[in-house]
Amino acid sequence: MFLGSQPASVIYRNHMFLGSQPASRMEVLVQGTVNALGYLEDGKYYREPDCYETMRDLIRYLRSDTPTLTARVECGRHNVISQDLIPILKTDDLTSEMFDVAVRLLVNLCQPAIASMQGKTPEDREQWQLYWALEENLLRAKSAFADPEFFRVLKGKLETYFLKTDWEDREEDSRLLMERIILLIRFVFSIRPTGNDLRSYFDTSHDKLVSAFLTAGLDEVLIQIASEPKEKEFHVAIVDIFALLLKEHTPEELLTTNEEVLAAERKAAEEELRAARERESVKVLQRRQSLSSRHSRFGGSYVVKGMQSLSSKSEMIVLKPVQAVSDLKFLDERKKKKRIAKNRRPFEIDQNTHETTTELRRLLSQMVERIMEKCFLRIMKSAKQMVFEIRAAGHRNSEINYFFLMKFVLRFCRLSGKSLQKVNCCIGVEAFHEVQLKLDNYLESTSVLKGNEAKSMGLKAQYALSAFNELILLHQYAADKGNEEEKNDGKGAIQHILRVEEYRELSPLLFSKFSPGVLSKNFLRELITTTHNYLRLLEKSSKKGDLKSVTKRTKIRKPKTKKRNAGSQAGIDTMKQTELDELWKSIEKELQGVLTGFALEEEVTPLNVVLDVEEIQHQQFAMLSVQRSIRSQLLTDALKLYRSARKWWPDQGLFGTEGIPVGEELKELREIFFADLSEVIEGLKKAETDAGVDQNEEDEEKESDVDEEDEEDKPAYNVSEIAFDFDNFVAKYAKSDVLQWYVYVLADFKKNSVELNKAIVKMLHRIAFDLKMTSRIYQLSLFRVFSQVGEYFSCLPKEEHKSSPFFELHTFGFHVLKKFFTAYSTLQDKLVVEVLFWKNARESYEIDHGYGSFEQDRETEARVWTEELEEEAKHLYEEYRDMEERPADIDVLDFIEHNLSRGRTRKQIYKKLKEFGLDTLGAKSNKGSGDSNLPVLELKRVHDEWNSREDKDKVDLVNLICEQLSESYGTVSRSKVIKQLAFADILYEKPKKPRRLPEWPEDLIAELTKLKEQYEEIDYAEQLLGCNIVQYIRKKLSEKKPTSHIERFLESMGVSVPQRPPKTNKKSTKKIIVTNSDDEEEDVEPPQSDVESDHEAIIRDDEDVDDEAEAVKEPVVSKKVEESPKKNNHLKELLAKVATDPTNTLQNRLKSRKRQFAQLFDSDNESSDDDEIVLSQNRNTGEEEPESRQSSKSPDASSVQQVKKAPRIITSSDEED
């Protein structure tokens, strides 16, 4: 009997007698089951009667397969997909159950090889052999899917369910079948290219598959499904299908349908193929010539004349005959290269793009246009949510397909000139932000993961970066060539990505994180191109003046909390009784308020379990903790400890009883506050020493826990506006970790695209010539590239140089090498060593300016202010001063510091402004920082309320702020409020405490009151009597009392006391300014004499009599050094005249003043001496002289001239007047 006609169970029973291994039994079992399906003859498939049960058996075998996947390998080796399953699906009389089972089996056999191995990468040789066996089975079956009839069958099923069946009539089994069909299409297009695809150019297996798919019209059904919001479960799979359809094509290719262009491309491709064949034939011929069929009869050793060996005294020796010297391999060429570890070895990801036929291009172009018109917006929104938020297990690679389809459609839209409204879900600031976030996440994952998982994340980062690059190009196109609305949207998005720091720092960050073992060279090429496009936008906006300022993030550094030391703890424990009394008065009301509204939400353990002590000592230690908390003004913590201890020891009553009133509780806390617990402190120290516990460490741990909680709540960065300089930004790329990757990619300049080589040359040109850092790229690896470029151009005719795609690279290398050899003529051999290494800013500067010049110039630049820099600082100062509306929170020092061309610190600018004699407009050299916990706006509001009060002189501003902020922010210390007021530029003056009145007898107070009333009854008393009320009372009072006491009594009576002139330093010297006829002033200091000492005694006696009389100092004359002896003689004569002049002597002035006080009330007639004293008093008090006295003192013109001619002496008091 034929084996295929027997059921699978019979076959299994007939082979039970074979004593073979389980794997061999499975092989025989699968072979018999496959033969029992049916057979294909003349294009028609004939099913066996039990075909349905046989397919179910195969599904069961695949489900219970061996670890070596024997059933799956055997099904692929027998080519079940192309020989049985696809023909079964195309038969006309197929039942729905048979179709369902066939699709189930087909989906199972078509899943990717890595999925069959449970997503694990092969590790050993056997696993790799199994992996490639599964891949070969899929490649063998791929061509069978390129059948339009097969796709029409699938299309009919999809149309029937989605387009012809209402939502209410759909069954769950039918929906499950639709999911399998869409999944089958996805698996079919995910099969990698075959070996023949690499050799053929136009007619590949993928093109055949795509052509059959589009010919059947299955794309239209998928587009219709994608446009329906109810079918969003299928949208991710449809995105994968569209991406896999287009993965081997480019938008430029699809938009190129002109026959002439196609003919030119075909001709160029044929010529390239012919040249490749010629190069290959030359290599084969050279290889044949090098292989000698006969043994050389001329063996031996040979000496190469004129070529030095490793030893300087001998010539090179070879051990075989040499036809040409150029065939010799030197030592550096014979050395083996250092082997790179496998996990750090650079790798590339093949992108199998190729040209296709005109008809296929047209069909694909029409499909992309239909996608844009009907479903792109809907499908991308649904897929984004499913791929990035839900992260389904079956869509691990859907992120790659999402970014690929996004890039492809955006590029197609830009090149075809379509409206951006069709793709507006993937453009704008939100799109930039989403792609940038995903890119950061992928890079973080690559640094954490290892092996193929890290490479998978690197591949996702590559596609995300290519989508970011296309977003830049699309918005640039919209800003340049779009309509009015598109231009505004494009410019707004461009300005956003140029101003925000996250986008500006993206490229330098990616270069610094690039790892060749995780990220491919394709990623590096894409990164260079993206950086080039972004810098082009940045430079354009900077030159136009549209980008004057950008945002800068500064990390908020939390101030470090001071560690508690033993000294501060001891200070709390050893407070004096007066300090305790004052502290209790200040916290009593606050403690009572906390007791009233306090509820114990969480209990605190009042005992330290580490300490091995008795129960009574634990209670004492808990009481000490409560006392310390109250004295430290941590009232909430104290109440937690106090009430938790009450619950812990309820019987003793040491911490009160449950339910006691607030007043009793306050009394008990007061007793704990004032208790002397010195013995408890000593016991605690001893217990901690025995247990090895350090209290400071516990406090630090508690503070660190609080700090961590605060850091989670506070933002990590502060965003501010800074001026933008394009050259400074480009300088970030002039680093070795960036330049080495540019040179690394440039080494493949022949394989690189023209756009990539242009981007590399442009960046190197910016650094070398725009920033004048040519020495940064003096590197041997770059010079080797220049050498290869030179060899390439040496073989080209001169007339073809400019048309070569490498002409810009050749020109750039010429100028760099010219600069290098110019520097070599100066530095000689030193520069040769520098070429071997990458250079930083210091080394590059020393190559250009000499070794050791970097530190010298740096120190000089930090100290020296050039004339141009000083003028610039003055100009900035004037600009800030003339501003009508000055920026908030920016003083003149901040303005100059941020706008100065060279960096100078705030203190340096402050000193320079002081040297110029300029007003700093209230700015201080050290700008304080505020407390972020206290809101400035709240403080200003309270200050405005306080300022509008009539009794503000009696109300302390700081106390008022502490009271109003305590409800929202808890207990706020005065020092924090005062610091925050200073930070907010609010002037705070502490109100003066009212001084107590001195203890006087009642009769003396009554006498003072009568004298006050007597003085107030006299009209114009001060002008008539020549003294103020304080001097009058002090003179008339029966007992001598200090002036300050009299002033305090008068102030308590509501009298406005005149302000006393400030006391002068008695030890300071008095200057006598000598005015000559030539209007020159000289300071002269005469020597002291015995007469002057007598004057000092008279002054001291006079001060004892009258406290308000002006202290007269000895007339000390300071003398300037004069070269002319005539002036010295003139000064001597002048001093002699001063000593003999009776009107200017000190005794005369003292006698005049005493005479005035003696005759104050005896006579109303005032002498000329009294007039002089009154005038001097009027000058001191700032009062105006009577007109009669002014007229009597005003000299005529002749007298004025005489005064100008004669020298005069002016005392310091006169000079102040």
Image (spheres, rainbow, N blue to C red):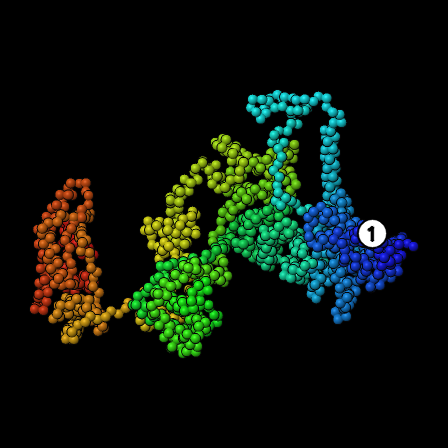
Give the secondary structure at mark 1.
Answer: loop
Q: Residue at x 15, y 58 (%)?
A: 1111
Relative to the observer, which residue lies in front, 585 or 672?
672
Q: Quadrant of the N terminus?
A: bottom right
In this rendering, position of residue 1084 left or right of residue 770:
left
Q: Residue at x 77, y 45 (%)?
A: 196
In the image, farthest residue toward the front: 614
Q: Quadrant of the C terminus?
A: bottom left
In this rendering, position of residue 930 left or right of residue 528:
left
Q: Which residue is mark 1?
A: 19
Relative to the observer, which residue lies in front, 523 or 1192?
523
Q: Position of residue 51 (x, y in %)?
A: 86, 59
Q: Position of residue 485 (x, y in %)?
A: 60, 59
Which quadrant would residue 96 be assigned to in this image? bottom right
Say above or below: 152 vs 619: above
| Mark 1 neighbour class, 10 Å CA radius: few under 14, some 14 to 19, many 20 or more | few
Q: Position of residue 531 (x, y in %)?
A: 58, 48
Say above or below: 210 vs 628: above
Amino acid type indicated by mark 1: Gly
Say above or below: 1054 vs 152: below
